[in-house]
Image: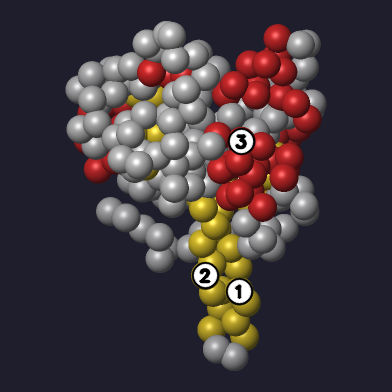
Amino acid sequence: MVIDLFRCIGCHACTYACKAENKTGKGVFWTLVFDYERGKYPNVIRSFLPMLCMHCEKGPCEQICPSGATYKRADGIMAIDQNKCISCKACMVACPYQVRFQNPEDCDETAEAPQKRDRSLSRQPGIVEKCNFCKDRIERGIARGMKPGLDWDANPACVNACPVNSRTFGDLDDPDSVISRLISSQKGELLHEEFGTGPSVFYISAGKSLPTRFRTK
């Protein structure tokens, strides 16, 4: 994913589209938008920084998970197997971006198939979850012959909801894809590249340094 910080207007449409799509628990938002200031008084500009799971190539969350619940999919999405999660929160501590969340004890469980004991079919209290790039939407879209990044029904909900098109989604492994060309032409940056985690979310900030107030380590 690529996020253009100069397009983002801080409307939080992505935040609520994500919540509606994934039906997260009370007070749990997998996508957040922080505001910060650029420049020095009196020449100060208010800007916004959307934050979500970075789907790192070398995620500390995956490395520290004792049960194997956190795993890297073949398509690059960092996912969580709810059936394996033991609610130890080790991944939450290890995540340098602090974008993992534990379901509240009073979360609204969506029992789609109560006769089955597969926990992945419902929202489980205590289980750690996060942004998964709306993998279910992507899988349904691909099954119908659609291509993520090009077709609406194969895109993450946050991408579709953005009113100013600040988010772009696609295949980083394809050098000719829209997202790859965008990163190359607009010099997409990584948030805290020094962590060495290899994020899959890039930011366009016109050559200016990304904000440092969100450093967590």
The amino acid pointed to by label 1 is Arg
Q: Secondary structure at mark 2?
A: strand
- Circles 2, 3 touching at the beta carbon (< 8 Å): no
User: Which residue is found at the position 54% from the left and 67% from the top?
Assistant: 35
Q: Quadrant of the N terminus?
A: top right
Q: Residue at x 24, y 31 (%)?
A: 87
User: Residue sitting at 40 percent across and 39 percent down?
Assistant: 107
Residue at label 2? 36
Q: In the rendered view, does 102 fall on the left or right side of 147?
A: left
- Residue 105 vertical position relative to residue 138 in the rendered view, above or below: below
User: Which image quadrant is residue 181 in?
Assistant: top right
Q: Earlier in the sequence, mark 2 or mark 1?
A: 2
In the rendered structure, the answer to whether residue 53 lies left or right of residue 180 reads left
Mark 2 or 3, closer to the camera = 3
**Distance between the Cα atoms at labels 2 and 3?**
27 Å
Q: Which residue is mark 1?
A: 46
98 or 29, which is in the foreground? Answer: 29
Residue 21: assigned label? 3
Going from N to C along the chain, the mark reached first, 2 or 3, is 3
x, y percentage for residue 156? 65, 33
Q: Quadrant of residue 142?
A: top right
- The alpha-carbon separation of the residues under discs 2 and 1 comes to 6 Å
Residue 95 in the image: x percent, y percent?
A: 32, 41
Mark 2: which amino acid?
Tyr
Q: Are marks 2 and 1 in contact (CB under 8 Å)?
A: yes
Left or right of 104 on screen, residue 121: right
Q: Give 175 or 116, whichever is nearer the viewer.
A: 116
Label 3 amino acid? Glu
